[in-house]
Image (spheres, rainbow, N blue to C red):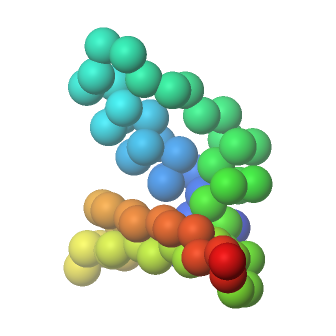
Amino acid sequence: MTKKDSKAVHELLTNYLLKFPIHQEFSYEEVVRNLVPKEGVIYSYVVENSEKQITDFISFYSLPS
């Protein structure tokens, strides 16, 4: 995932969360701040179809403890 993917990721995340009666709403800025990869801390990946459209994503934190 790169910053240019953030708009599509925001849309996917928003549409997914709407399935639940109680859910957090993320602004575009929050998606950029919390999901764009940061070396050694945030890892985010996207899945693209054959037409280069983002269909899925995954993101996780890895903090040394």
Relative vertical location of residue 5 with respect to residue 21 in this rendering, above or below: below
Q: Is residue 40 left or right of residue 21?
A: right
Q: Residue at x 30, y 13 (%)?
A: 21
- Kindly tell me whether residue 30 is visible in this rendering: yes
Q: Position of residue 51 (x, y in %)?
A: 29, 74
Q: Is residue 58 left or right of residue 25?
A: left
Q: Residue at x 67, y 81 (%)?
A: 64
- The single residue placed furthest to the front in the displayed view is 65
Locate residue 28: give its quadrant: top right
Locate residue 23: give its quadrant: top left
- Kindly tell me whether residue 4 is visible in this rendering: no
Depth check: give the residue in front, 32 or 50: 32
Q: Position of residue 25 (x, y in %)?
A: 55, 26
Locate residue 41: give its quadrant: bottom right
Q: Residue at x 49, y 53 (%)?
A: 8
- The single residue placed furthest to the top in the displayed view is 21
Name the quarter where the N terminus is drawn: bottom right
So how many labels did they put on this image? 0
Q: Is residue 40 left or right of residue 52?
A: right
Q: Position of residue 22 (x, y in %)?
A: 38, 16
Q: Position of residue 17 (x, y in %)?
A: 36, 32
Name the quarter where the C terminus is drawn: bottom right
